[in-house]
Image (cartoon, rainbow, N blue to C red):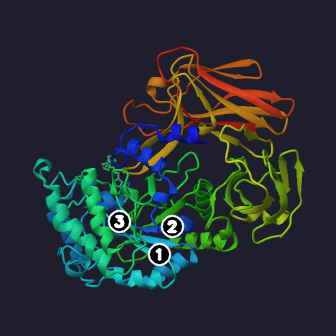
Amino acid sequence: MRSVANKFLLALFLSGSVLQANSQTMDEMWDSRSSDQEHPNIGWFKDAKFGMFIHWGLYSKLAGEWKGKRYYGSGEWIMNQARIPIAEYSKEAATFNPTNFDAEKWAQLAEDAGIKYMVITAKHHEGFSMYDSKVTDFDIVEATPYKKDPMKALAESTRKRGIQFGFYYSQFQDWYEPNGGKNTWDFDESKKDYQQYYNNKAIPQLKELMTNYGPLGIVWFDTPGGLTKEQTNDFIKGLRKLQPNSLFSSRVGHGLGDYRDYGDSEIPATPIKGAWESIYTHNDSWGYINHDMNFKTPREIVHLLAQVASKGGNLMLNVGPDGTGKIPEYSEKFLRETGKWLARNGESIYGSTYGLVPAQPWGVSTSKPGKQYLHVLNRPLDGKLVIPGFNANVKSVAILGGPASVPFKKRGDVLEITLPAGEAANLATVCVVNYAGKLADLDLNAPVSVSNQFEFNSVEAIFGRPQGNTRVRSLTYSHYYGDWKHTTCVTGMQDSSDAITFQLNVLNPGDYQIIAEYSCPEESAKLEGSLHIQNQQYLFRTLRTSEFVKSAPLMFIKHTLATTTFSTPGVYPVVLRPVGSGKELFKLKSLILKPVR
Ligand code: H79
C-alpha cells in the first residue's frame, strides 16, 4: 500500500491553485509523520469523524447578487469576483441584522445530525469580523444594527452538547486591510506590508478568539501567505501559549499544523494514516447563495461520510446560513436525516479507522479491532455480498440496527454474506463482520471485483498499474468560480509504450461492456487507442469532451470501448494504451464494467 500511496501523494496537480502551491512538500512531510509527533489532544479529532463547517459573513447577506447581477460559484468570494470596492462593500454592514440567528437551534441541529465538532468563520477573506473585536470597528457588534456577538452564544450552545467548537480564521487574506493579502482592486499589491497586517490585525484577533470563547477544539486556518516557515512556526508558538489544547489545521502553511486538510472538496484516492480531514460543502457554494439549490441528498451525504471514513479521515460538511441567520431548509432537513442514519450506524463511523476490505462494487469498509464494517452503498441484486481475500476466521456477521446474526459462508478466503430483504431502503446498510486473527493491511494491487449483480462496476484509476510515462495523479479543476473539484486520473499516456493495466476479478461469467470514463480536451480528440482483453485487441478513437485547450474544467464522458464475454470466473487483465504517439490519449477517471442483461 505504501508505494501506491506515495506515488499518489507525490503527484503534481494539473492546474496550480492557491491552496496547493505547497502541496508536494506538505504531502511529503505529512506522510513521514510518526505518531509520537502527534498533538497530545489529537485523539478526540480522530474519533470525531463528522464535523460541521459554517460560512457566515456579510457575503451571506449579498447571497450571490450584487447590483442586480447574479454571481455563481463561491458566494464568500463575491467581493473579489465583482471587484467591489471596500467603500461600497463595508456599507453592507449597516443593514446586516441576522435576527433569525439562534445559537441553540444551530447547535441542536448539529447534535441531531450526529456532528462532533463545529468550525465557524470568525473572519473570512472579506475581512469582516463576525465576533466582538476590539482590534477593528469592522465587526458585527460595532458596524451592524445587530450589535451582539453571536459567537459567544454559539460557543456555549455547542460546548454544552459535547460538541467541540472552533473558529475558521483567514490569517493572510483580508480584503478590507491595505496590508492584508489579495485585495488588488483597492490596493497596490507591491506596497503591501504583510508583517504589519499580521502584527496589527491577524495575531491580535486570533488572541481575542483564543481568549474570549472558552476552550477551542480547532483553529482552522486557510490560504497561507506572507510568512516564511520560521515565521509560521513563531506564529503558531505564540498562539499555542494561549490554548495548548487547540488543534491547528494544516492550512496554517509550510506543512505545519496538527492534522492534514486536503483541497476543498477532495478525498484522497487511497487510505491515509494519521489525522486528516476532507471538507465539502452541502451545495456548491460555501457562503449562502440564494440561487444555489444543488444540495447533496441524505444518501449522498451518508455515502460521502462512508467514503471518507473508509480512508481513515473526517468529513467536515459546510452549511451556509443566510444573512438573517437562517440555515437553509434543505441543509436542516438532510442533516437531520444523516443524523438518523448515524444514530443507527454510528458505531461504524465514530472511532473507526480505514477499512481493510478494498473498495468493492457494493461499497467500502471501515475498521475497529476485530471488526470490519461493510458499508453497502450499492445493494447487489441477489442480496449476496461477496468479500474476496478475507483471510481471517469469521465469528459472526450482524447488521447494525438490524439482525444480530445473518447467514454467511466462507469459500476459501471468499466471504459471502446474505443481506436481509428489508434493508433495501436504508441509506446505507452496514454489516459488521466479527473476526478472529489478523487481516493483512490493505492491498491496493489486489484485483478489483467485477460482478453481474450491479448495474455498473466502476474501477477507479488508482487501481491501475502504470507503465512507461503513465502516471496516476490527482487533478484539480473548477466549474463555477472557486468551486474546486479533484479527481484522480490516469495521465501521461502518450505513446504505445505507455499503458495502464487493471486486474479484474470477475466473479460471475457473462457478457460485459467495457466503458472508459475520461476527459478529452481538444488536443486529445480523435486519437486512436487500444484495449486488450482475453487476447483480443479492440481499437477506438477518443471523443472530445471540451473545446477549450487551456484551463477548461474537466468534463467526463462514458465511452463504450468493447463488449466481451467472460466464460469462467477468474482474474482477467485489461490493458489500455495509445496506438500512435505524441499526444496524451485522455485523462482516464475509471473503467466501468457493465453487465449486459
Ligand atoms: O472558505 C472556502 C473558500 O472560500 C476558501 N477555502 C474554503 C474552505 C478558499 N480560499 N481560497 N480558495 C478557496 C481557492 C481560491 C482560488 C481562487 Fe480563483 C483564485 C479564487 C479566486 C482566485 C480561480 C480563479 C478560481 C476563481 C478564480
**Residue beneath disc 3:** 63
The image position of residue 430, as x and y in percent, is: 73, 62
Give the Cα distance between marks 1 and 2. Answer: 9 Å
Which amino acid does the dot numbered 1 rest on? Answer: Gln
**Residue beneath disc 2:** 45
Q: Residue furthest front?
A: 36
The residue at 65%/41% (across/down) is 444
The residue at 16%/67% (across/down) is 200
Helix, strand or loop at disc 3? loop
Front: mark 3 or 2:
2
Visible residue check, residue 279? no
Front: mark 1 or 2:
2
**Residue beneath disc 1:** 164
Visible residue check, residue 269? yes
Front one among 448 and 273: 273
The reply to whether discs 1 and 2 touch (Cβ–Cβ < 8 Å) is yes
Find residue 334 and name its label: none
Q: Is residue 105 above or below residue 454?
A: below
Q: Quadrant of residue 183?
A: bottom left
The image position of residue 277, as x and y in percent, is: 49, 58
* 202 sits left or right of 73 in the view: left
Which amino acid does the dot numbered 3 rest on? Answer: Ala
The reply to whether discs 3 and 1 touch (Cβ–Cβ < 8 Å) is no
The image position of residue 154, as x and y in percent, is: 40, 81
Which amino acid does the dot numbered 2 rest on? Answer: Phe
* 54 sits left or right of 57 in the view: right
